[in-house]
């Protein structure tokens, strides 16, 4: 391990609370170097100094580093499967599901779930968390650019959004069932008894050890027969290790 990077990791952890040793090193270093050269910074020390002096730059850097791109109905097949395989079952059981969108970024994933649940006429509560305060701000505001809404079917756009400037705003009825909260998946405690946890396109950035630890924690945070939803690049090779069973593309059920 490169010593300068190791000492940067320590200073960064102290400054931001984010432990970079849990993230894949090559990928992180590449992104950090890109950001430094874009901002004319010559050393990790210069970067730390800038992060200490400028709160806006600090937020911008954190957002850049943790890659918060997202969009509504991302990976449509997954939401189609949730809609046909899971929601009818919940409806039959008369369940008010507790859903957690972990690493929700700008909230598109949480709102997509809220749309599906409302369409299925289910009551629900959704917790949506992320480490990136900037992304959460957009999530809370509920205002999106057109390119973030590409996956939204036109009739859904008409029902759940209103046009605002160049983009759209989600209707208040959609915001009501969702709590957005800052949470660091590597540090902060997890809730319990969720009926579904979505953690998609977050894992890929973590080391294998961290991925494994988090999967154990997620499985513990599910109620029995609850569902874990992964990103398509994050499908598990051995779900049984966590008590999970793969039931469809990116969908796992807690069995024991
Ligand atoms: C690419 S986005 C994925 C958003 C959404 N889940 C999706 O699939 O469209 C990855 C998100 O993970 C968040 N993230 C990265 N590290 C995190 C951590 N340690 N704790 C919580 N969230 C984290 C980032 O801030 C970012 O918003």
Image: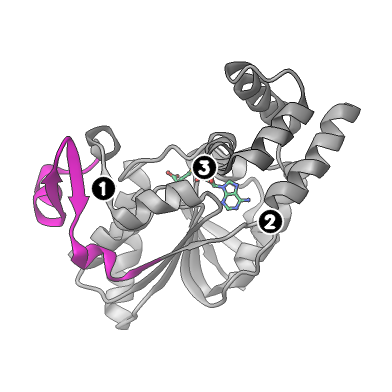
Q: Residue 94: within the magenta?
A: no
At x 50%, y 47%, the residue is: 200
Q: Is mark 3 within 8 Å of ligand 1?
A: yes
The answer to whether marks 3 and 2 mark residues whose Cβ atoms lie closer than 8 Å is no
Furthest residue to the front?
53
Question: Could you say which quadrant of the image residue 52 lies in?
Answer: top right
Instruction: Name the element at disc 3.
Output: loop
Left or right for 171, reference 210: left
**Where is mark 1, residue-wise?**
143
| Magenta range | 151-179
3 or 2: tag closer to the N-terminus? 2
The kind of secondary structure element at disc 1 is strand
User: Residue 93: image x %, image y %?
Assistant: 33, 81
Q: Residue at x 49, y 51 (%)?
A: 133
Measured as percent of width and height from the top left, residue 5 is found at 82, 30
Looking at the image, is mark 3 or mark 2 nearer the viewer? 2
Residue holding disc 3: 201
Residue 186: assigned label: 2
């Amino acid at each position: 391990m490169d010593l300068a990077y190791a000492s940067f990791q320590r200073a960064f952890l102290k400054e931001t609370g984010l432990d970079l040793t849990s993230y894949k090193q090559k990928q992180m270093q590449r992104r950090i170097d890109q950001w430094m050269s874009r901002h004319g910074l010559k050393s990790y020390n210069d970067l730390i100094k800038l992060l200490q002096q400028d709160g806006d730059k600090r937020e911008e850097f954190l957002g850049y580093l943790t890659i918060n791109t997202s969009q509504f109905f991302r990976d449509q097949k997954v939401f189609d499967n949730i809609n046909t395989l899971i929601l009818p079952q919940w409806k039959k059981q008369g369940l008010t599901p507790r859903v957690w969108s972990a690493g929700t970024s700008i909230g598109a994933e949480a709102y997509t779930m809220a749309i599906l649940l409302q369409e299925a006429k289910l009551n629900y509560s959704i917790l949506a968390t992320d480490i990136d305060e900037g992304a959460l701000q957009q999530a809370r505001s509920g205002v999106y650019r057109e390119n973030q809404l590409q996956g939204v079917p036109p009739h859904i756009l008409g029902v759940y959004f209103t046009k605002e400037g160049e983009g759209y705003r989600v209707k208040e009825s959609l915001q009501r069932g969702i709590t957005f909260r800052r949470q660091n998946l590597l540090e902060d405690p997890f809730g319990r008894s969720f009926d579904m946890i979505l953690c998609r396109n977050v894992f890929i950035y973590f080391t294998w050890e961290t991925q494994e630890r988090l999967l154990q924690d997620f499985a513990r945070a599910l109620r029995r027969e609850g569902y874990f939803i992964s990103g398509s690049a994050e499908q598990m090779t051995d779900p049984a290790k966590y008590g999970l069973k793969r039931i469809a593309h990116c969908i796992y059920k807690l069995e024991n």
